[in-house]
Image (cartoon, rainbow, N blue to C red):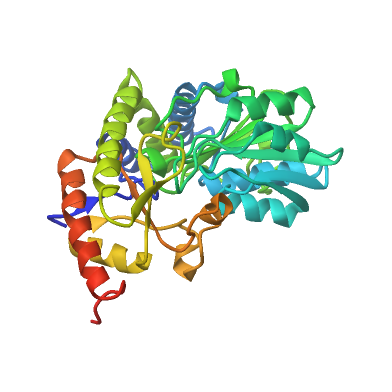
């Protein structure tokens, strides 16, 4: 659509040109099952393994540590299910994504560790929550609503000292901050392709070398018997292409551009009456900001911005449809009902930021005149 300004990259980022080209070329080739030994199957296997190498290189892992999945949600579920046989208890922070919180709750007993007003967890509090029957500790790298970066290195080190498995949800961080899985020392990390300009329907679970987990999906020996089912070859190829596109300093350059643009959004928005910033502004993912909007329902703000050609989001992707308060903001002790998330990505331009900064004051002024709700019709 012409005249549109997309500022919801934290939900999903459009596929990069390199991804579209790679997937198109893959789809034009004869279809082949990567598990077969005929020419078509072997060609598909080569494509999958090349993509696996690209993912491994981007995230500082060994290729054999990359288990390809349908996305981060499956990767999280696999981590939870695989670890659950080791103990009846898991530890999560209060600001984890619903995919982590709900999967852990279904697996058994859960201890939820609180956060401070900026959404940051205390590593000592995480350690204190570990029990003799703790199977897995979860800590996200970057928060999906407010962008706060968690002290993942400290949490991972503490868990390793105690012999407890630790899973890092890196879905919101991947493609925006440098990630080196081997150097970090985590046991497990979940990744998402569509968050960094890859295709939806692709992701990975990084599994530390030597760690054995029971598979979530059964029925085949794909992924070295760690994930049954024929690989989604075009999506896997697209994931690899997205990872490759971030090489050669591109990730760092994109992150710098993203931080510059979100700093502009923060500066412009917080000058408006009744608008405040949420999260740890000193330690945050570069691509997203979260704003509290006093006295105005978030759906009204989103509709107003959408009518002005700006796509944005409020709250978490999994709670907004039910119009429930944000668990993340509740855990931080701020208004969990009225927030606005603006997020940039590889395709964002300064004109997109200009459009948001132009539209937001007008939208808020009009809504306050209407009592905080959108006009009928």
Where residue 280 sits in the image (x, y, percent)? Answer: 46, 38
Q: Is residue 286 left or right of residue 87?
A: left
Q: For the view shown, which residue lies furthest in the right direction?
A: 132
Q: For the view shown, which residue lies furthest in the left direction?
A: 2
Where residue 335 sits in the image (x, y, percent)? Answer: 47, 59
Whether residue 132 is situated above or below residue 110 in the rendered picture? above
Q: For the view shown, which residue lies furthest in the front direction?
A: 273
Q: Is residue 27 left or right of residue 109?
A: left
* Residue 309 shows up from this direction: no
Q: Residue at x 68, y 47 (%)?
A: 216
Q: Is residue 269 or residue 163 the one in the foreground?
A: 269
Quadrant position of the N terminus in the picture: bottom left
Q: Is residue 117 or residue 94 the one in the foreground?
A: 117
Whether residue 287 is situated above or below residue 368 in the rendered picture? above
Where residue 377 sits in the image (x, y, percent)? Answer: 23, 81
Where residue 146 sits in the image (x, y, percent)? Answer: 45, 45
Report which quarter residue 234 is drawn in.
top left
Q: Residue at x 22, y 56 (%)?
A: 360
Q: Residue at x 35, y 26 (%)?
A: 251
Number of on-image labels: 0
Q: Is residue 178 left or right of residue 222?
A: left
Q: Residue at x 53, y 52 (%)?
A: 328
Q: Is residue 90 or residue 71 the one in the foreground?
A: 90
Report which quarter residue 28 is drawn in.
top left
Q: Is residue 359 left or right of residue 165?
A: left
* Residue 296 shows up from this direction: yes
């Amino acid at each position: 659509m012409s005249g549109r300004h997309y500022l919801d990259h934290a939900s999903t980022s459009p596929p990069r040109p390199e991804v579209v080209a790679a997937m198109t070329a893959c789809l034009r080739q004869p279809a082949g099952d990567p598990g077969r030994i005929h020419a078509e199957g072997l060609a598909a296997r080569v494509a999958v393994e090349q993509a696996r190498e690209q993912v491994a290189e981007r995230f500082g892992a060994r290729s054999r540590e990359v288990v390809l999945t349908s996305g981060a949600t499956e990767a999280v579920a696999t981590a939870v299910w695989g670890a659950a046989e080791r103990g009846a208890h898991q530890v999560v922070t209060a600001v984890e994504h619903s995919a982590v919180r709900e999967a852990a709750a279904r697996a058994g007993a859960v201890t939820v560790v609180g956060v401070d007003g900026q959404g940051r967890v205390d590593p000592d509090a995480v350690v204190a929550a570990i029990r003799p029957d703790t199977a897995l500790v979860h800590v996200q790298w970057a928060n999906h609503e407010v962008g706060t970066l968690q002290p993942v290195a400290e949490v991972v080190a503490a868990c390793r000292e105690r012999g407890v498995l630790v899973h890092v949800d890196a879905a919101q961080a991947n493609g925006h901050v440098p990630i080196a899985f081997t150097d970090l020392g985590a046991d497990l990390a979940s990744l998402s392709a569509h968050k960094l300009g890859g295709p939806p329907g692709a992701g990975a679970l990084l599994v530390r070398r030597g760690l054995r987990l029971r598979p979530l999906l059964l029925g085949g020996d794909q992924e070295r018997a760690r994930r049954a089912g024929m690989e989604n070859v075009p999506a896997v190829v697209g994931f690899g292409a997205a990872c490759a596109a971030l090489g050669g300093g591109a990730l760092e350059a994109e992150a710098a551009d993203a931080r510059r643009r979100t700093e502009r959004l923060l500066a412009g928005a917080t000058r408006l009456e009744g608008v405040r910033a949420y999260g740890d502004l000193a330690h945050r993912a570069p691509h997203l900001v979260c704003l509290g909007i006093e006295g105005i329902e978030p759906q009204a703000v989103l509709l107003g911005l959408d009518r002005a050609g700006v796509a944005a989001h409020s709250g978490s992707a999994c709670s907004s449809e039910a119009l429930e308060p944000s668990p993340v903001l509740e855990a931080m002790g701020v208004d969990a009902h009225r927030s606005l998330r603006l997020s940039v990505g590889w395709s964002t331009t300064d004109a997109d930021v200009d459009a948001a900064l132009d539209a937001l004051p007008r939208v808020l002024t009009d809504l306050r005149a209407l009592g905080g709700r959108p006009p009928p019709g």
